Image (cartoon, rainbow, N blue to C red):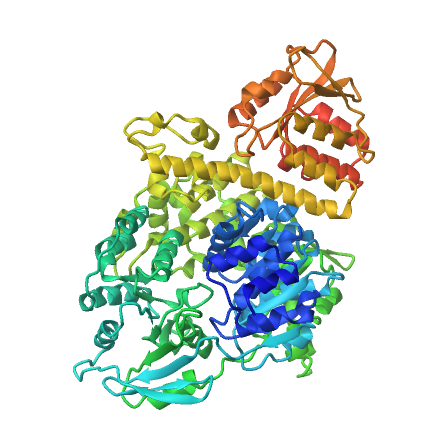
């Protein structure tokens, strides 16, 4: 089946062209099976199980794009932040220009959370934990969604993530009607009835589009390679000399034996071993000429160990990849590999899941990993091995792939073959029975208003896969009841839940705990911290010390509490990445990505502490300090630079130069940067980086308006008569904008009875309507390209001194896409002096109109909101007020 045939499924040709240009031509077996299955196309729940590199994730991508292009919402669930980042960047690059609004929510991204709660998106890529948190604040996120894709569903058995994913799916499954659920999973031995529980059609294959040969290397012996697809074997001699007695020597021979066009992934289980192995392999590799463009791309990275390594050794065509790299560093390494510039990557399992970096050969150099909980080395499981091995073989570019395991001892081949090569991944089983109590899960149920008493909570859990597959067959339902009882009692004792007349209610603190997603034990530590006297004047180090010993931080080994606080303090102060990595890399190396991960977790904890402060009624100065410290910890920049850091377009060091430079210049306001003369950036940033920054700011403004438009048009699906008017308001420019606004406000469903008038002979007509206290005058102004905010000069034309001779109760400017920060500051200042003037971004007036059409506000409430508000009104100002 050719990708062009997807047009027959209602896919627009523009998207087919995008896929074809990205290398998708002929569909794989699992893709063809899925797209010709009526169940999938008619909206039934589907469980798709296929080996790594078989193309199953493309199925989810096509379905999400199809939904979003038809103005439906799609949620794409992923388990890891790195995978969320990869999907977001990949989708944004492909589909942003095609008009699809892409957002992401993870531990690294919270900037789109308000958009997701409001439904202002086409495709939302969300990490499991974040969706659970968002649902506490807005339970309608899923019910208003058309499609839910759960990637890596085999993690239902994972002790950490499994219970959360299972309860999310249980919640979605109970919705009537609910979204279509599409589960994507690696091959598992047995689904254990999961597909039956989900009422999902199983679409499965164990075949790979590219044959995979698997074997074990024991020193210099020839290797028997097994093709599990057709049951054949072949013997290959890798020409290992008898002197190759350790893994580094074997890897060196394998690296030398690669043909120039062949590529290899080497998997190590320790982060430090990836860099050490790469450094040792350098000596085995020939020198190749590297383009100046490639070196320029490397030098765009933050000054860090990996940039130094790449700059020094890129001519050897080798790189390393692990959780210590930043998102930008990992992404560049992946790009260099996929384009063939890099021939060998030494990596941890960060490249085994989701990330699209197939190779000709995979070498699994380690099959044991240190288990901190058990205090000993433990074998990696079969599923992890299969994910690593599955990276061998490029569909459409190679005819087969090879994966080998390096034995530790002689005589180990048979054991490793039987366990890893011929072994099956574990069956799909619920992880909920592993939990001694279910306090964390029960809190989410109560806070999400899914149940308010023990019988109903038990009833919800009785709808779970755990009950169906474990508790019920074993007739041990009482164990589930005990776990729930223990969880409820724990929540009551902590004051996170209260009980009255048999009804369970989440307390204000409990609501914060549920929204945050931190461990309940951690929440207690944060609450105690917020109650500490003198916290408002505590140093940054003391503040960070209060959060760096909780469980979420302890998982970020190898640091102890004091070192975490010291490193984070340096990060917040703006110390360079290279200095921090040098100062704190002792027994273990510390990469840019690990520092940023610490910052992200610190931001999460400090934001939760700030929310606790609000719930406790703490002084606003303390709440503000915690909130500001959270933002600084996340990005490692002064608070005023956070909006620019959120754009993720320049390295942190470049962003810091916008306030710390020899010229004494401060450039922090995105709107002012767009307008700034290039001469202001001389000796601060090179022209190409200035252009890149300005372009990204403009894109961000346009993308924000697009998200708002998508969200409102989706709301209009139930309000068909209003949709053309809303669409016209968002799409109109120039003099047509005020006409479109007039039509919307005069529609029978809103009925403001506005009329056009001209204040000055040479001016364009404005609008006015009779409000409760007098006449409201409205002027509409729109930028031509939706990327330039409305200036203050345009905004102030509606002041009463400019041509209006009557008595007005308010002067309103409706602007598109939004207002320049100078206009916002000036309007708020005038409002503080008693001037009757209001700036309304276009999405706010549309939001007010839709609430009127939906019956959520009366005509009088709509009129008074427009008449009585002064300064600037944003969507956030409407939440919980009208």
Side of 401 where 728 appears, left or right:
right
Q: Residue furthest right?
A: 748
Residue 144 higher or lower than 412, as above or below: above
Side of 743 where 423 appears, left or right:
left
Looking at this view, is 31 or 665 the one in front?
A: 31
Tell me which residue sits at (32%, 26%) in the image.
664
Residue 506, image x and y in percent? 67, 53
Residue 125 quadrant:
bottom right
Residue 132 visible in rendering: no
Residue 869, image x and y in percent? 68, 25
Residue 751 quadrant:
top right
Side of 549 where 248 appears, left or right:
left
The total of numbered circles placed on residues is 0
Tell me which residue sits at (64%, 45%) in the image.
710
Looking at this view, is 479 or 533 the one in front?
A: 479
The quadrant of the rendering that contains the N terminus is bottom right
Looking at this view, is 705 or 171 the one in front?
A: 705
Q: Residue furthest left?
A: 243
Residue 166, image x and y in percent? 61, 68
Residue 291 visible in rendering: yes
Tell me which residue sits at (67%, 10%) in the image.
761
Residue 223 higher or lower than 487, as above or below: below
The quadrant of the rendering that contains the C terminus is top right
Residue 352, image x and y in percent? 42, 68
Residue 238 higher or lower than 617, as above or below: below
Tell me which residue sits at (34%, 52%) in the image.
592
């Amino acid at each position: 089946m050719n990708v062009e045939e997807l047009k027959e499924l209602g896919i627009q040709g523009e998207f087919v062209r995008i896929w074809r240009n990205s290398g998708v031509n002929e569909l794989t077996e699992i893709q063809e099976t899925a797209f010709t299955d009526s169940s999938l196309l008619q909206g039934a729940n589907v469980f798709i199980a296929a080996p790594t590199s078989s193309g199953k994730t493309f199925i989810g991508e096509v379905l999400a794009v199809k939904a979003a292009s038809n103005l439906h919402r799609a949620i794409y669930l992923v388990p890891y932040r790195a995978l969320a980042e990869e999907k977001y960047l990949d989708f944004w690059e492909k589909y942003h220009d095609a008009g699809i609004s892409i957002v992401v929510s993870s531990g690294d991204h919270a900037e789109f959370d308000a958009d997701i709660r409001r439904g202002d998106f086409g495709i939302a890529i969300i990490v499991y934990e974040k969706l659970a948190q968002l649902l506490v604040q807005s339970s309608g996120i899923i019910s208003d969604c058309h499609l839910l894709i759960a990637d890596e569903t085999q993690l239902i058995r994972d002790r950490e993530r499994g219970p959360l994913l299972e309860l999310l799916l249980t919640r979605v499954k109970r919705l009537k009607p609910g979204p279509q659920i599409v589960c994507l999973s690696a091959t598992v031995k047995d689904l254990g009835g999961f597909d039956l529980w989900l009422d999902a059609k199983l679409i499965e294959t164990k075949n790979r589009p590219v044959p995979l040969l698997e074997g074990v290397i024991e020193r210099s012996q020839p290797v028997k390679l097994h093709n599990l697809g057709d049951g054949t074997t072949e013997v290959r001699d890798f020409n290992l000399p008898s002197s190759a007695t350790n893994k580094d020597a074997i890897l060196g021979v394998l690296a030398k034996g690669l043909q120039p066009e062949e590529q290899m992934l080497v998997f190590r289980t320790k982060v430090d071993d990836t860099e050490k192995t790469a450094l040792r392999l350098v000596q085995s590799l020939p020198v190749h000429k590297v383009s100046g463009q490639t070196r320029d791309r490397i030098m765009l990275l933050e000054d860090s160990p990996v940039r130094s390594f790449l700059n020094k050794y890129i001519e050897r065509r080798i790189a390393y990849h692990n959780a210590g790299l930043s998102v930008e560093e990992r992404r560049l390494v992946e790009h260099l590999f996929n384009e063939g510039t890099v021939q060998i990557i030494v990596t941890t399992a960060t490249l085994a899941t989701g990330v699209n970096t197939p190779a000709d050969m995979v070498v699994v150099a380690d099959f044991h990993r240190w288990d901190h909980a058990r205090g000993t080395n433990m074998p990696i499981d079969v599923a992890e091995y299969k994910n690593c091995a599955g990276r061998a073989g490029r569909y459409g570019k190679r005819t087969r792939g090879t994966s080998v395991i390096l034995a530790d001892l002689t005589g180990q081949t048979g054991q490793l073959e039987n366990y890893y090569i011929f072994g099956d991944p574990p069956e799909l089983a619920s992880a909920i029975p592993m939990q001694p109590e279910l306090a964390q899960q029960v809190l989410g149920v109560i806070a999400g208003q899914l149940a308010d008493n023990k019988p109903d909570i038990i009833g919800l859990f009785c709808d779970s896969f755990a009950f169906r597959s474990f508790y019920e067959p074993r007739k041990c339902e009482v164990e589930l009841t005990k776990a729930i009882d223990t969880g409820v009692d724990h929540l009551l004792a902590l004051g996170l839940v209260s009980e009255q007349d048999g009804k369970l209610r989440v307390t204000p603190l409990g609501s914060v705990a549920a929204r945050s997603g931190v461990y309940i034990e951690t929440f207690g530590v944060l609450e105690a911290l917020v109650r500490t006297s003198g916290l408002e004047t505590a140093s940054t180090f003391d503040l960070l010390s209060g959060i760096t010993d909780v469980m979420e931080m302890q998982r970020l080994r190898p640091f102890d509490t004091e070192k975490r606080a010291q490193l984070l303090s340096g990060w917040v102060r703006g110390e360079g990445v290279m200095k921090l990595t040098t100062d704190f890399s002792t027994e273990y190396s510390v990469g840019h990505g690990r520092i940023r991960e610490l910052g992200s977790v610190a931001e999460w904890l400090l934001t939760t502490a700030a929310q606790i402060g609000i719930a406790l009624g703490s002084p606003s100065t303390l709440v503000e300090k915690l909130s500001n410290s959270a933002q600084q910890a996340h990005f490692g920049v002064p608070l005023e630079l956070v909006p620019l850091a959120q754009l993720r377009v320049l390295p942190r060091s470049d962003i810091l130069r916008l306030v710390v430079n020899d010229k004494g210049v401060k450039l922090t306001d995105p709107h002012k940067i767009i307008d700034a003369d290039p001469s202001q950036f001389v000796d601060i940033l090179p022209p190409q980086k200035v252009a890149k920054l300005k372009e990204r700011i403009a894109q961000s403004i346009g993308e924000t308006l697009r998200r708002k438009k998508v969200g409102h048009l989706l709301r209009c699906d139930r309000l068909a008569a209003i949709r053309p008017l809303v669409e016209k308001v968002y799409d109109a420019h120039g003099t047509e904008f005020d006409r479109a606004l007039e039509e919307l406000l005069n529609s029978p469903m809103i009925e403001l009875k506005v009329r056009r008038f001209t204040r000055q002979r040479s001016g364009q007509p404005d609008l006015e309507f009779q409000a409760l206290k007098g006449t409201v005058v409205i002027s509409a102004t729109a930028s031509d390209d939706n990327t330039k905010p409305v200036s203050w000069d345009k905004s102030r034309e509606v002041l009463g001194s400019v041509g209006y001779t009557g008595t007005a109760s308010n002067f309103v400017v409706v602007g598109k896409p939004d207002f320049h920060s100078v206009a916002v500051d000036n309007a708020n200042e005038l409002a503080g002096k008693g001037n009757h003037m209001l700036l309304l971004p276009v999405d706010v007036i549309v939001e007010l109109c839709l609430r009127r059409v939906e019956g959520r506000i009366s005509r009088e409430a709509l009129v008074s909101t427009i008449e009585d508000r002064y300064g600037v009104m944003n969507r956030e100002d409407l939440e919980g007020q009208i």
